Image: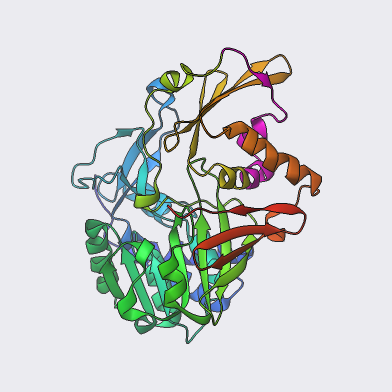
């Protein structure tokens, strides 16, 4: 197909429209961040990406269609300046953007996060002029570029665990005139050569707060990260580091999720029917329905994180109508099977998985079903506790 020559003018027009739209929606309250969105050429950071097809493929798998300037200029540029997350990599495999293939299924492992969320993360972390920042997860480099535009390149350090991703991001950043400090490094350990930082912002999620991040933030500095786990429960937290090397902060509202840091991703657990083979033949009525943590609601999103804190090594999968909980660390398992209007629970192993989750749900109800912003996370030495005045403490276990 013929590709228009005047791409930069088209991009500038769409970029201005994106900035205006986000401002009207309340995502760009700070004029400096609006200027950054209107300036940074996002299309330079996403030469190729995948978008989901309108219809699923065989077995319900998502069909991912490659989009590049060469394949479809209009779709490529419009998507680049939409408030959409653009998937750039699956299963750690770098696509061949000269001849990309349609994908069926797969786990996204790198992306260009939707612009409104990128700016929201920087704003929620209270990033201001004069701050030095560490970004965990360079990805495409677009978020890094926004920070450079806002703060100046000298104030920005960004690390990425995938060397191929970082190489492409670095090329795009430098081509656009941005020169932050970049390094191939694991976000679990931060980046000591540039510490200490005023702000640390993670574009990936962790099962608990990495101790190195607390050590690398100056006293009074802030860390914004997403906590996740193997039940795919998420909570964002903004921590303030104290003079003694601890940190504390409030959970933030909303339903934001990020890909897990690769070393914190859930392991494969095999065939659920093998785990179910050792369950007792009889069970008991469930005190709570599994739908309380699986429904597509903000409360279920919040509850899944709280439940996950009680069973940090559990994974969940639904086969037909049966919900399976599997713990690869202890060998424990549980199933919930619908029986009329109720659920039947069967459990085995050293950890009664659903019983522990029920205890959290019962305490949550007794406390009046409190929202995320009523919980605090306290980090002190080797201990991380989720605190609420009307509920028992929940501990995050470091992997």
In which image quadrant can residue 47 be found?
bottom left
Query: In the rendered image, which quarter contains the N terminus?
Result: top left
Locate residue 138, reporting x and y percent.
35, 63
Q: Report the label total.
A: 0
Residue 333 place in picture, x, y as percent: 51, 28
Q: Nearer the viewer, residue 175 or 112?
A: 112
Q: Position of residue 89 (x, y in %)?
A: 31, 47
Horizontal side of 219 relative to 367 (left or right) equals left
Q: Is residue 142 magenta?
A: no
Q: Is residue 319 above or below residue 39?
A: above
Specify start and end residues of the magenta stretch as a single range.
Answer: 281-303
Q: Position of residue 380 (x, y in %)?
A: 54, 68
In front here: 282 or 375?
Answer: 282
- Residue 287, magenta (yes or no): yes
Question: Eyeballing the image, is 103 above or below 114?
Answer: above
Is any part of residue 120 visible from this angle? yes
Q: Which residue is drawn at the image coordinates 34% and 59% (left, top)?
A: 139
Query: In this rendering, does residue 324 appear at all?
Result: no
Residue at x 69%, y 44% (from the top left corner): 299
């Amino acid at each position: 197909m013929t590709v228009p020559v005047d791409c930069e003018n088209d991009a500038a027009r769409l970029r201005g429209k994106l900035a205006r739209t986000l401002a009207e929606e309340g995502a760009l309250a700070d004029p400096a961040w609006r200027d950054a969105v209107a300036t940074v050429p996002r299309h330079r950071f996403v030469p190729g990406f995948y978008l989901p097809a309108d219809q699923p493929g065989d077995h319900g798998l998502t069909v991912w269609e490659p989009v590049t300037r060469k394949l479809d200029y209009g779709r490529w540029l419009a998507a680049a300046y939409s408030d959409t997350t653009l998937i750039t990599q699956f299963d750690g495999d770098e696509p061949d953007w000269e001849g990309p293939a349609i994908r069926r299924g797969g786990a996204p492992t790198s992306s260009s996060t939707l612009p409104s969320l990128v700016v929201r993360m920087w704003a929620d972390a209270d990033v201001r002029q004069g701050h030095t920042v560490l970004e965990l997860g360079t990805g495409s480099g677009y978020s890094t570029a926004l920070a450079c535009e806002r703060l100046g390149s000298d104030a920005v350090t960004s690390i990425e665990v995938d060397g191929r991703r970082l190489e492409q991001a670095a090329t795009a950043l430098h081509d656009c005139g941005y020169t932050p400090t970049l390094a191939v490094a694991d976000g679990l350990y931060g980046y000591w050569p540039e510490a200490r930082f005023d702000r640390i912002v993670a574009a990936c999620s962790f099962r608990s707060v990495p101790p190195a991040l607390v050590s690398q933030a100056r006293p009074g500095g802030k860390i914004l990260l997403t906590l996740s786990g193997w039940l795919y429960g998420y909570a964002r937290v903004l921590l303030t580091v104290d003079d003694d090397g601890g940190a504390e902060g409030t959970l933030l509202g909303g339903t934001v999720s990020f890909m897990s840091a690769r070393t914190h991703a859930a392991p494969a657990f095999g065939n659920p029917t093998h785990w179910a083979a050792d369950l007792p033949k009889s069970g008991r009525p469930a005190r709570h329905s599994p739908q309380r943590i699986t429904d597509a609601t903000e409360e279920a999103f919040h509850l899944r994180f709280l439940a996950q804190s009680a069973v940090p090594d559990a994974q969940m999968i639904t086969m037909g109508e049966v919900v399976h909980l599997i713990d690869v660390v202890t060998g424990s398992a549980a199933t919930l099977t619908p029986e009329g209007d109720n659920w039947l629970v069967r459990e085995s192993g050293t950890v009664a998985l659903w019983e522990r989750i029920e205890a959290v749900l019962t305490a949550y109800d007794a406390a009046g079903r409190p929202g995320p912003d009523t919980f605090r996370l306290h980090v002190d030495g080797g201990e991380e506790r989720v605190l609420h005045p009307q509920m028992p403490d929940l501990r995050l276990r470091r992997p």
